[in-house]
Each structure stands twice: as structure tokens, then as C-alpha cells.
Image (cartoon, rainbow, N blue to C red):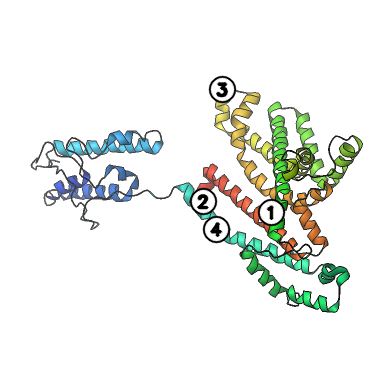
Amino acid sequence: MQVICRYSSANSTLSLSSIYSSVTAQESRHPPFHSFIGYFIDIVQYRHPWLSIAFRNRPPPPARRCFDLEKLSKRTKTGIGLYRKKLAHSLRGLEESLVAIGCPVPRYPLPFSATTGATGPIKPIEHGATATEIAMLRMIVTRIPQMIVVILIVTIIAFVMVNLLPGDIVSVILGDQYTPEAAAQLTQELSLDQPVPIRYLIWLWRAVHLDFGTSLATHVSVVESMLQDALPTLELVIGAMVSAVILGSALAIGAVASRNPWIDRAGTALALFCTSLPNFILALIVTTIFGVQLHIIPTIGWADPGDAGWGANIGAIIMPSIILGLTIFPSIMRIFRSELQEQLESEEYVTLARMKGVTGWGLIWRHVARNSAFGLITVVAAGLGPLVSGAVILENIFAIPGLGTLLFQGIQLHDSPVVVGCVTVVAVIVVLSNLGADLVYAALDPRVRDALNS
């Protein structure tokens, strides 16, 4: 097809809008060519926001083309940057071809679309949120209502169970000073004369404002008591997680890399033993053997870090952390071992590494273990609940003044504000840890993001 028109200026700059303007005059002579160019410009400039870098509001300098290939070439480190560069070269070739057949090329962009009704200079299209951000936002919006429902159910169960405990809380608080008048006054102050649903709603309204009430036994704020006792529990749970991950990962890697059935059998037997034996029984056995008989570990006692220093309780926290870590150690070892075996048997990069001569421990440690570690995120987050519940018992056995000891004392004294406050805080921590694990897993694994965005 031959298009005859006048060439306006040899130094004019090219743009897709100018191409459309130049062929508008040829509409009566060549309608198919006009329709193709108009459709092409509409599709490129409106349907593909990643081309926004090629279109500008300001007029380009005379010695420069509309497509800044120098800036586009800086983006060639990624696949989309390479695609932009190739597309820019293609559009440059289209402009040069139209110049060769004599189309006039104005210097400034003109109104371009007669099919969509858009007029005025072309405005760059801003980039939106990435797929990862959309997946994260969608997961958060979906999970927040579920988290609220779970926390409400946990608090309702805890509140009802505490109020159903046998005994009279007023008699426990007054003790030797019990009189009918004092009992009636205390009952009215604690709203014990109200029905349980009314008392729960009153407590829930205060809890939303981070007011869990005052301890009935010590007359100290529940929030203040939990903040004072949170550090030992935090140290115990973190130590248990670290010990469980180290022990489970070491046995899983050893069983897969060595190909020795005895290592696999020993790890399986240890996992079965830890699963079948409660941690408090194991704690009593370890305390009796290594503490009472052999005097290797301290059996009781916890120093105040403010007086004795932060390193004074390291020896007292090691053995409870290891025993508590054995609670989730079997799950970590089983899932990590299955992930390692799946990567070794099915992934192509493993075959390529073996062809390069990487085998044995080097292959497992440098390549396979990193890609198999994603499954540990969910296991560790899901194991936070058993760790916190196990810490309640172990803190009482090893005399560690943590949240478990505070909760146990609250149950003994029928101290409902302390019990419900501790249970609520633990439930919130567990729910938030699960949400955080899911977010991290979605950020690291593109398959999860694709499933969320589909």
C-alpha cells in the first residue's frame, strides 16, 4: 500500500499520536489502514500501563525520539524490562517505516483517539499495586473477621468456665474478714450479682480499651501483672522454638543426606517417644536425673534480671527450653524430611547440580535445604499454641515466674480477671502468629500468591 502525503519537517519528533494524526487525512482514501493504526494506538496506549514510560506530557527535545531507549535499557535486568526494550525497538521501526513513505510528523503530541473519545495530550499511566501487595491485602481482609470470631469464642469459653468453678470467690477474697455485710458490698462492687452475659459484655467493653480489670487477689492491674511476667515466658518460648528447629532440622538433614537407615530410625523413634510422652512427665524425669541425682542443671530458682543481670538465668532456662521444644520437634522433623525428599526426587535444579558434581551434604545444605525451609514457617507458627500451653505447666515445675505461673495462680484463687486476661492475650498471640506465618509464606512462595489472586 502506498500513502502519498507531504513531509513537513526533517527534524520533527515521532510519536504514535502523530502517526494517527498523519493518517487521519488519508481516511477517505485508505480506511483499512486508518482503522488498523487507530486500533493499534488505542490498544497500546490504553491497555498496557507498562508502556507509560514511552509517553510524556512535555514535548521531547528536537534531537530526541519519543521512546527513550537509554532509560528503557536500564530495565533489562528483568524479563519485563527486556520486553519493554524489544517493544520500543519495534515501535521505533514502525515510525521509521511511516517516515520512509512520507507521512508528516509534527513535533508536539496531538489529540489522537476518535474511537474512544479521548482528547488532549497523552498522560502517563501510574503503576498500581503489585501482585504480592494485592495478595497480602486480600489475605488480611479475609483473615481479620476470622481472627475476631476466634478470639471472641475463646474469651466466652474462658469467662464461662471461670465463673463455673466451684467455690465462692467472695469467701476466698475476704478470708478471715468474711461477714455478710462485707460479702454483700464486695459482691456489688465486683458486679457478681449481675448475670454472666451482662458481666461478659462489661468485661469485653473494657478489654477493647486494653483494660482487663484488677486482680481480685492482689488488687494489681492485670495488664501490669502480665507485663511483669511476660519476659520469662518469652525467653522460654523462643528457646523452645530454637531448640526444636535445630534438633528437627539436623535429624531431617542427617536422615536424608547420609542415606543411613539407622539415623532415620533413631530420629523416628525419638519423635515417637516425644509425641507419646507428655512434657511435664519428661520434665520430672529430667529434673530427677540431671538435677537431683547428678547436680548438672539447676532444678529451681529464678533471679530477677534487674538485680542479678540478664545472663543470670541462662542456666535455668536451657533445660526447660529443650524439654518444651520437644513438643513440636516431631512435626518439624517429619515435615522438613518430607520436603527434602520431595525436592531431591522431583526438582530439575537438583539434577543440574548433580551433573555439575555437587552431591551429598553440599547438595543438601547449599541448595535443597533452603528451598525446603518454607514449610517450617507454618509448622513453627502452628506450634506456638502448644508451646504456650506447655509453658504453663513447665513454669510451675521449674518455678519460673511467667505467664503460666500467673495463670495457674489465678485458677487456684478463682481470680477471673487474671485468668480471662491471660487466656485472651495468649489467644491473640497465637492468632497473630498464624497470620504472620501465612503472610510470610505468601510473600516467599509465588504459588500461594497466584492461588490468592485467582
Does the image show residue 191? no
Q: Which amino acid type is marked by label 4?
A: Thr
Q: Secondary structure at mark 2?
A: helix
Could you tell me residue 172's position as x and y percent?
84, 67
Q: Are marks 3 and 1 in contact (CB under 8 Å)?
A: no
Depth check: give the residue in front, 379 or 305.
305
Q: Which amino acid type is marked by label 3?
A: Met
Give whichever of discs 3 and 1 has the lower sequence position.
1
Give whichever of discs 3 and 4 has the lower sequence position.
4
Q: Which amino acid type is marked by label 1?
A: Leu
Give whichever of discs 3 and 2 has the lower sequence position.
2
Residue 90 as seen in the image, left or right of residue 108: right
Residue for point 27% across, 37% down: 68
Give whichever of discs 2 and 1 has the lower sequence position.
2
Residue 291 as seen in the image, left or right of residue 136: right
Depth check: give the residue in front, 261 or 410.
410
Q: Residue 136, labelled with which disc?
A: 2
Considering only vertical position in the picture, is 12 above or below 215? above
Q: Secondary structure at mark 1?
A: helix
Does the image show residue 50? yes
Depth check: give the residue in front, 241 or 259.
241
Q: Secondary structure at mark 3?
A: helix
Q: Are marks 4 and 1 in contact (CB under 8 Å)?
A: no
- Viewer-nearest of discs 3 and 4: 4
Q: Which amino acid type is marked by label 2?
A: Met
Give whichever of discs 4 and 2 has the lower sequence position.
2
The residue identified by callout 3 is 355
The residue identified by callout 4 is 142
* C-alpha gap between disc 2 and disc 1: 31 Å
